[in-house]
Image (cartoon, rainbow, N blue to C red):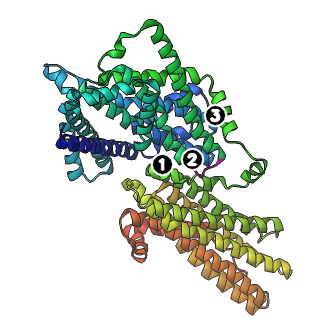
Amino acid sequence: MDFFDVLSMIGGLALFLYGMHVLGEGLSKASGGRMEQILEKLTSGKWKAVLLGAGVTAVIQSSSATTVMVVGFVNSGIMKLSNAIGIIMGANIGTTVTSWLLSLTGIESGNFFVQLLKPASFSPILAIIGVGLLLFSHKDRYKNAAIILIGFAVLMFGMDTMSAAVKPLADVPEFTNLLLVFSNPVLGMIVGMLLTAVIQSSSASVGILQALCATGSVAYGTALPIIMGQNIGTCVTALLSAVGTSKNAKRAAMVHLYFNLIGTILFMLVFYSLNAVLHFSFMDWAAQPFGIAVIHTIFNVFATCILLPASGLLEKLAYLTVREEPSEEVAARYIDEDIKVLDSRFMNNPAVAMEQCRRVIFHMAETVQESYNRAVTLLKEYDEETVCSVVQMEEDVDRYEDVLGTYLLKLSGKELSERDSRSLTLYLHSIGDFERISDHAVGIVRACEEMARKEMHFSSKAQEELEVFTRAIRQILLTSFRVFQEEDTALVSEVEVLQAVVEELSAEVRKRHVKRLRKGKCTIELGFLLSDIVTGYERIAAHCMHIAVSMVQIREDSLEMHGYHEEIKEREPEKFRSLYEAYLQQYALPEKKS
């Protein structure tokens, strides 16, 4: 084996690892947030959890990614540790799919159709289709499909390159003698563990072992302990992801380690005990990629069948390893559960991270709406407890804005699908509007506080007018938030109409106030407070309009706000006019006395 063979082997390994990364990324983007939704909805059933874990890992082609995702879910409080155990076990089974795909490289036959099953035969076809889709398609789902096809082709090409490069090693006595050393179970496990810990992928390290099988010098007796070590080495990724997390997230990572460690020890004890009695002849046979896939699968299925019924024991071991301190139990109750779901571990899976952002920003919108609803109750009846709750909500919304803004900006640097990229831009534009609406809700509270302190009251007529105005603002809030959450462009025209109605109401309320002031039925001081409330209402409506219109503008790649206002009126003038008249009637102020 000369210098150029070594260069080919390293190049093949690089392509193999890159292909695996691209394939997993493409599959993850294509799945969107659905993988996260499936995992999140898991509530019971150990075997159901195993099947879900296996299925998700088979799709995204990485047990490490699934386990890290689970650690993030446990850290954010979405998932209980007991539910996470089954998914972690299933992830180990799901990761064997890669080794089965790679085992196809060993197919030998002169039959045309059998040869076509070899990845070396069909992966160029997939690469051509993938490149064609990538170059000529503008739709997001086709681009994701292209990335998947290209990733698979690169993966298989790298595998073939590695296999071809290491074939000359079969004639090197030093190499075969070195492999004899690894037939020692302990040394073999250490090598497999270190290799997997370095590249942080058991699928990749198993693939490298399958490539070495091309030399014909790797016996099953040598391969088996290396595979066992690879399963332990893959825990490094989850352990690293758990640094700086909650106690439960650390326990999830420890469960992954204990599962593989105990499973490996039990499997080795059972296997080598049987081998001592039965003397398995295949131990001296040259290992084949297919055989490596079989061993990898048998181990993971064996470990799951043995340890799943004892999952409670794994959980206890994790609790013994990562102990809870009494002071932390009290502090944990005050952690904002929403903010916790924005876990940095989800950054490696942008589709999942966006789904978490969606969840949090919807809760932010609900908090803003509730803060307004509580604030306006003070116009009828002042209550100190309500004041405190609105002020607290405003602080919560400020925190939402800070954390979401930081998280979204980091996420904007990742590769996102077209839909997620659009949503991210919308969220960045909208969180400031939400925060300002909550500020205006506090402004209403401050006006009510001053009135209560000075024992002032609006006249019955002013109260009736404010009641109508309050309902109109509640309607525009509700409609604009529906536009935001459902991304429903059909409702944007309703928000525009309501905005026009609010402007009409504002002008009329101010005009009526001036008339009462001239007749001595209202004081200047009360007039200032009324003006503050009306101004707050106007600004809330303006932010609602901005939220609704931003969604359409971002979708159409246009950020001209003023032009869009006129466009809505001109597009369907009759519809706009009829809606306007209907809302004007619905929110008509009480008749004035002559």
User: Given the image, on which type of amino acid does mark 1 rest?
Assistant: Val
Q: Please say if 280 is above or below 463.
A: above
Looking at marks 3 and 1 on the same chain, the residue that comes earlier in the sequence is marked by 3
Q: SS of the residue at dot 2?
A: loop
Q: Is residue 183 left or right of residue 5?
A: right
Q: Is residue 243 magenta?
A: yes
The circle drawn on residue 242 is 2
Q: Is residue 327 left or right of residue 152?
A: right
The image quarter in which residue 380 lies: bottom right
Nearer-the-camera pick, 506 or 389? 389
Question: What distance separates the C-alpha of mark 1 from that of mark 2?
Answer: 18 Å
User: Given the image, on which type of amino acid does mark 3 rest?
Assistant: Ser
From the image, tell me which residue sits under label 3.
82
Say which residue appears at 13% left-offset and 22% top-offset.
Answer: 112
Q: SS of the residue at dot 1?
A: helix
The image quarter in which residue 30 lies: top left
Q: Quadrant of the N terminus?
A: top left
From the image, tell me which residue sits under label 1.
352
- Report whether residue 19 is seen: yes
- Helix, strand or loop for the magenta stretch, by majority: loop
Circle 1 or circle 2, nearest the eye: 2
Magenta region: which residues?
A: 242-246
x and y percentages locating residue 448 in the rendered image: 77, 76
Q: Residues within 10 Å of mark 1 (few under 14, many from 20)?
A: many
Q: SS of the residue at dot 3?
A: helix
The image quarter in which residue 286 lies: top left
Say which residue appears at 38% left-offset and 27% top-offset.
Answer: 181
Q: Residue furthest top?
A: 278
